[in-house]
Amino acid sequence: MNNAARICPEPRATGAIWDPALDRAWKSHAVRLAGQLVRHGVLTDGAWRDAVLDVPRHHYTPSYYTATPPGPGSTGWHHHHRPDAGPDAPAGHAWLRHVYAQVPLVVALSGINIWGRQYPVAVSPHPATTMRLLHTLDIRATDRVLELGTGSAHTTALLARRVGAEQLTSVEIDHEVHHLAARQLDQLGHHPHLILADDMVLDTTPLHPTEVASRGFDRVLVGHTVDHLPAAWLHHTHPGSLVLTTLTGGLGIGHPALLHHTPGGRLTGPFLPWPTDDLPARRHHARLTAVRRPATPAATRPRHRSTPVDPTTLHANTPLALLHQLHLPGGTTAAVRTDAHGRAATYLHAPDSSWAEIAHQPDRRGHHDARVAGPTNLLDALTEARDTHHDLHRPGWTDLGLTTATRSAPGVAPPRATSTVVWCHDADTGPRWPVHPAPVRLGPTS
C-alpha cells in the first residue's frame, strides 16, 4: 500500500498566502486566540505571546481534514479546502475562525490502507497543548532546540520565532510532509535546519553543524508518541538538557513526561498532569491502526473464564490503563468488538498469538465473562495490574515517571540501546516496570 502522506494541493500554484487582504484579516483572529490562551492560563510568557501573534497559523494549514462516520466509499475523512473567496466574504471569515480556534487541525493523511482507511500523519496541534509544551520545556532565547516530527511546521515556526532559525533543527520522516513544511517555512523567511529521517532510528551523526562544539541540544520537543526512547536521544543531548516526550504502547495509552538529562547519563522525570494530542510515530501507527479493526480470534480452543477486571478501563487514558499496558506482553493490542445483538467486548491480542475476549457487561457479581487462548494468560496480567494499582493507593499521573538509560555492549561505543522503566513515587527506590516496545511490523498492515 502507499505509505506516503496525502496532502491536499495548495490553492495557488505559487503557494502564496491566499490574497493580500488575508494578511490584514488574520491578525484579529490571532489576537483573539492569544487572549483566550492567556485567560486559560496556558500563555504566560510574553515571548510566546509575540510568537502567537506573529506566526500565521493559516499559512501552515493550506487545508485540513475532519473525521466523518465511515461508510461505503468513505475513508472516514472530509477534506476542507481553503475558500477561494477573500477574507471579507462569509466563507473567508468562517475559515479563519476555525483555523484560529482552539482545536487541532489534521493537515495530512496516510495513504489508503488495506481496509480503505486513512489516518492522520501531520497535524497542527491544539494551540493550548502547544503552549503548555513550549512553556514546560522552559525554552530560552539562546537554547539549541531539536524538534522531532516537523508535521505542519506551525510549531516549527513558533520555535524559530523564539530562538532563531539558526538554533533550530527539525526532523520529519515523511518526504511529502517534509518538503511542504520546508516550502511553507521558506515563504515566510524561516530557514531552520530541516532533516528528512526517522527520528526513532537516528545514529550519533551530528544533526546540526554546531552540535559537536555545543555538546548537543538544550531542549528536545518530540511531537509524536513513542513506545521506547532511542539511545541516540541521549547522545544528542547533554547533562542539563530537557526532553519532552509522550510514552505510549499497544493499547494506545500515552501520556507526556518531562525528562532531565542527568550527570549520570540518564533521562528521567515525571509524567505531566495534562495529556497531549500527539500522533503516534509514523512507523508504529500502521500496527496500532491494524489491530483496532475487529478480527476473528485465532483458531485455538478457547478457555472460558471470569474476571473482576472491567475491560473498559483498558481504553481510558489513565494511570490504571498504563499499568495494564505495562503488565501485558509488549506489543499487546486491544480492540472493541460488538456482536449482532449489540453486546460489546474487548479483544486483546499478544505477539505470541495469545488472546482474550472480555465482555463489557458484568454479571450479578460484578465479574465479566471472558474467553482466553494461547500460551500467555492475559487475564492474570490484567488482574495483577489492577491489584498493583490498588496497593499503590491509586496513583495519579504525577506520581508516576519515566527513566531511560543506555545499555552498553562490549566493544560498542556509543551505546546503541536503552533500558526504559516506568516508576511510581521515586525514580530510584519506588516500584518500577520495564517498558517493552513491540517489534515493528510494517508491510501489508501499513
Image: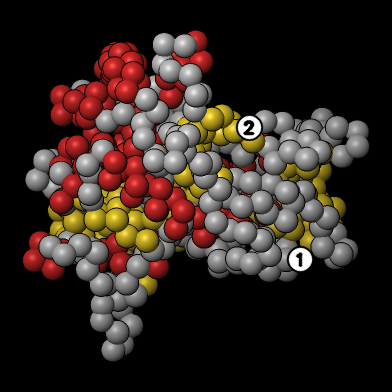
Mark 2, other Cα within 10 Å: few <14 / some 14–19 / many ≥20 = few
Q: Secondary structure at mark 1?
A: loop
Please say if 436 is above or below 319.
below
| Drawn side of residue 275 relative to residue 114, left or right | left
Residue 258 shows up from this direction? no
How far from the left and from the top, in percent, is residue 443? 64, 67
Provide the residue designation for mark 1.
374
Looking at the rendered structure, the kind of residue marked 2 is His
Q: Is residue 253 left or right of residue 200?
A: right
Q: Nearer the viewer, residue 413 or 174?
A: 174
Q: Secondary structure at mark 2?
A: strand
Q: Position of residue 232 (x, y in %)?
A: 30, 67
Q: Report the front residue among 231 and 34.
A: 34
Residue 393 relative to residue 375: left or right? left
**On-image quarter of the C terminus:** bottom right
Residue at 35% across / 21% down in the picture?
22
* Up/down of 358 relative to 81, above or below: below
Picture residue at 54% right of the left edge, 30% below the top: 81
Please name the residue shown 47% across and 11% down the image.
Answer: 89
Give residue 207's quadrant in the image: bottom left
What is the CA distance from the residue labelled 2 to the residue labelled 1?
41 Å
User: Residue 434, percent across and down?
Assistant: 45, 61
* Three-letter residue code for mark 1: Gly
Residue at mark 2: 78
Residue 172 visible in the current orientation? yes
